[in-house]
């Protein structure tokens, strides 16, 4: 008449998982059934991530002991209530288990020996979980015991329904009407502490039972007016036997023989004749409950989940808060209505926690402790770049692409696009500097054009000077290609245009330096270098050196051109919008070729630095190349260490600084003579300075 006990075990595990209780205590009876329960539950716990903090065994049979023995027993069970921190405690056994537990708790709370160690609130913070075999009953000697500690207990009970007429039946029960029923008389005398007239029992008090006592006046631990699951099963068991007998008699009456006087032979029903029939019986009882058995002869039914609510007068009531239905779909076998549950008022939170240690908050992950059960763990903060947004996460996880963890690492935030926008301070400074230097370059070009007939301008190869100034002007303007959101066109042009224009500038400087050297070497009588002096050589140097760089850039664009790209990893909180160079090798070939031109120009200018100043630009070119090389040598490590828009800003600064160095070192001394000291800008002065 009881559903399969394995279903109840699964229900306990699902209940613990529902409330997140992973650190629980187990109290059972000290017998074979209790040991079997412990072995089964420990196995199921380990499979479902639950640990038992302690297992305690109580005697299977309640017996009266003297105070000393009871105190010793209480002391042996003391650690459950004083040292263990598990909030959820599962109790397995019989109803006598509650008698033991209540007696132990009473001794712990009453005796002065315990007062300095025991805190009463620790008991009121326990959530007792009882199995269907247990009813909360007390013996008459425990009438003064406080049952408030059981408030909020959650119990699995055999599924039951209210049987019509049961309440009226209880109200009509009187000891005088129970003929030959010694149980009713004994119960009545114990429950109401009185003596029934003409009873064999003799009690110390002399009160006589009036017979008008009412069962409704008894508090719940001693008598429940509602039909419990146990009573409901007894009720159904009687009806199951009755139905089986009825069916058996019908079967026998149809087949029994008559005697000679045509009298029916008496019917005899043996117990074994009912056994197989009861297992196949199916009927509806008066409470409209369907009673049937499965193939193993077990009752087809589930369990109710009830919540115990106590009152100040030490009575209680049970409230149905859930159902354990074996026929429900997976995941819905256990249903709990949390709103109906009344918890202990001393709990710090509801539902309460029952864990080995505090849960790991979001932003942390669990770390296993050595030498303890797996339910106990430490909490470690998530590594950089990872997050956890739930409690007790086993491991931290990475944010989705395009997101990064916040300061507390408990959620992900979208990354901000990173590029050198026109409205940013760095961009405004770069644009302003580029425009200013472009205007200065244009002004210098205008001065040289307006003074093209003067000795100073003629002496410095006008065509190469104009070419150099125009290329420097374009270099300053090239810096604008690096500002703004990277696009396909700007990515294709920014490095190639800059490389070609700068190569033209360096080629022009190299041509001017070579021209100065050849001019002085060719002035020696009989020099074979005289045939190389002239504009043709200078133009050839400029065109050939520039075309090599142009060829490298064309090859770059043909093989693996730059393109707009997104860098998600280099910066934690930002998405870098950049121009992917395509081929890094080709990019460094462009820079390397410019470096080669600069080194050659610097070397030639350095060797020619002591030629007469009147015709000599070598000294100024030497200084300009020194500035140029210093800028670009420092550019490489700075560029490689920078990220995002700062990488772009480094390249813009290098372009502007190196171009400004060429402009200032080569042209400002000449502009000084042309504008400020025009009296020195004539052939006689140049010749005199030469002498």
Image: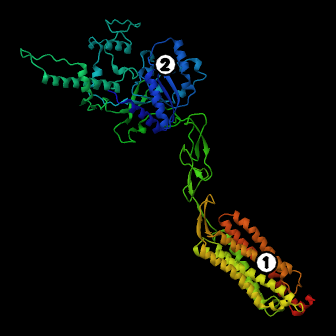
Up-down relation of residue 366 to residue 118 (above or below) = below
| Of 134 and 38, the residue lying toward us | 38
Up-down relation of residue 470 to residue 276 (above or below) = below
Horizontally, residue 294 falls left or right of residue 95, namely left
Horizontally, residue 196 falls left or right of residue 670, namely left
The local secondary structure at tag 2 comes to helix
Spot occupied by residue 151 in the image (x, y as percentages of width and height): 46, 29
- Few, some or many residues within 10 Å of mark 1 (<14, 14–19, 20+): some
Name the residue that disc number 2 marks: 103
Spot occupied by residue 160 in the image (x, y as percentages of width and height): 32, 30
Mark identifier at residue 132: none
- Mark 2 and mark 1: Cα distance apart in space: 103 Å
| Of 549 and 681, the residue lying toward us | 549
Up-down relation of residue 688 to residue 166 (above or below) = below
Of tags 2 and 1, the one toward the viewer is: 1
Horizontally, residue 303 falls left or right of residue 266, namely right
Name the residue that disc number 1 marks: 600
Q: Earlier in the sequence, mark 2 or mark 1?
A: 2
| Of 181 and 631, the residue lying toward us | 631
| Of 140 and 592, the residue lying toward us | 592
Spot occupied by residue 466 in the image (x, y as percentages of width and height): 74, 87
Q: Does the rendering let one see residue 660?
A: no
Q: Quadrant of the C terminus?
A: bottom right
Residue at the far right: name it: 691
Rendered residue at 47%/28% (across/down): 39
* Quadrant in the picture for residue 113: top right
């Amino acid at each position: 008449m009881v559903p399969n006990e394995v279903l109840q075990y699964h229900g306990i595990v699902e209940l613990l998982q529902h409330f997140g209780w992973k650190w629980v205590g187990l109290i059972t009876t000290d017998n074979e059934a209790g040991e079997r329960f412990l072995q089964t539950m420990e196995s199921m716990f380990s499979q479902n991530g639950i640990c038992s903090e302690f297992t305690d065994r109580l005697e299977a049979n309640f017996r009266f002991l003297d105070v000393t023995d009871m105190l010793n027993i209480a002391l042996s069970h003391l650690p459950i209530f004083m040292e263990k921190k598990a909030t959820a405690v599962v109790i397995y056994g019989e109803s006598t288990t509650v008698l033991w537990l209540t007696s132990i708790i009473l001794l712990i709370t009453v005796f002065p020996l315990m007062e300095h160690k025991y805190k009463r609130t620790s008991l009121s913070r326990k959530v007792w979980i009882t199995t269907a075999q247990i009813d909360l009953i007390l013996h008459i000697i425990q009438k003064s015991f406080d049952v408030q500690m059981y408030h909020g207990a959650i119990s699995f009970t055999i599924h039951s329904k209210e049987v019509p007429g049961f309440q009226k039946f209880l109200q009509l029960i009187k000891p005088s009407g129970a003929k030959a029923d010694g149980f009713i008389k004994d119960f009545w005398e114990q429950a109401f502490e009185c003596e029934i007239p003409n009873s064999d029992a003799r009690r110390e008090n002399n009160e006589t039972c009036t017979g008008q006592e009412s069962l409704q006046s008894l508090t719940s631990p001693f008598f429940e007016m509602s039909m419990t699951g146990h009573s409901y099963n007894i009720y159904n068991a009687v009806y199951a036997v009755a139905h089986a007998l009825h069916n058996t008699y019908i079967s026998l009456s149809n087949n029994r023989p008559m005697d000679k006087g045509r009298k029916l032979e008496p019917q005899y029903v043996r117990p074994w004749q009912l056994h197989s029939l009861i297992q196949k019986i199916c009927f509806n009882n008066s409470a409209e409950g369907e009673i049937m058995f499965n193939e193993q002869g077990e009752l087809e039914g589930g369990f109710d989940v009830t919540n115990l609510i106590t009152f100040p007068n030490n009575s209680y009531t049970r409230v149905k808060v859930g159902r354990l239905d074996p026929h429900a779909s997976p995941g819905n076998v256990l249903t709990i209505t949390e709103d109906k549950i009344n918890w202990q008022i001393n709990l710090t939170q509801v539902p309460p926690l029952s864990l080995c240690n505090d849960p790991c908050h979001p932003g942390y992950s669990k770390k296993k402790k050595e030498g303890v059960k797996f339910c106990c763990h430490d909490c470690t903060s998530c590594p950089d770049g990872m997050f956890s947004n739930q409690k007790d996460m086993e491991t931290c996880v990475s944010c989705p692409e395009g997101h990064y963890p916040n300061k507390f690492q408990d959620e992900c935030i979208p990354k901000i696009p990173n590029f050198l926008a026109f409205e940013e301070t760095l961009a405004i400074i770069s644009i302003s500097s580029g425009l200013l230097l472009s205007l200065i370059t244009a002004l210098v070009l205008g001065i040289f054009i307006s003074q093209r007939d003067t000795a100073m301008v003629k002496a410095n190869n006008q065509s190469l000077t104009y070419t150099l100034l125009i290329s420097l002007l374009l270099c300053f303007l090239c810096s604008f290609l690096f500002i703004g959101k990277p696009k396909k066109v700007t990515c294709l042009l920014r490095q190639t245009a800059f490389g070609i224009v700068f190569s033209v500038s360096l080629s022009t400087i190299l041509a001017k330096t070579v021209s100065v050297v050849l001019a002085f070497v060719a002035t020696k009588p009989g020099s074979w270098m005289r045939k190389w002096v002239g504009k043709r050589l200078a133009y050839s140097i400029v065109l050939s050196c520039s075309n090599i760089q142009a060829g490298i850039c064309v090859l770059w664009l043909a093989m693996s051109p730059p393109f707009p790209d997104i860098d998600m990893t280099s910066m934690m909180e930002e998405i870098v919008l950049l121009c992917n160079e395509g081929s890094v090798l080709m990019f460094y070939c462009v820079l390397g070729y410019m470096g080669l031109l600069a080194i050659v120009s610097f070397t030639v200018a350095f060797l020619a630095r002591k030629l007469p100043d009147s015709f000599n630009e070598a000294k100024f070119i030497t200084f300009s190349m020194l500035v140029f090389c210093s800028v670009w040598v420092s550019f490489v490590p700075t560029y490689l260490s920078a990220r995002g828009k700062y990488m772009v800003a480094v390249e813009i600064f290098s372009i502007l600084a190196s171009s400004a160095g060429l402009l200032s070192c080569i042209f400002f001394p000449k502009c000084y003579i042309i504008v400020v000291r025009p009296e020195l800008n004539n052939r006689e002065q140049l010749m005199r300075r030469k002498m």
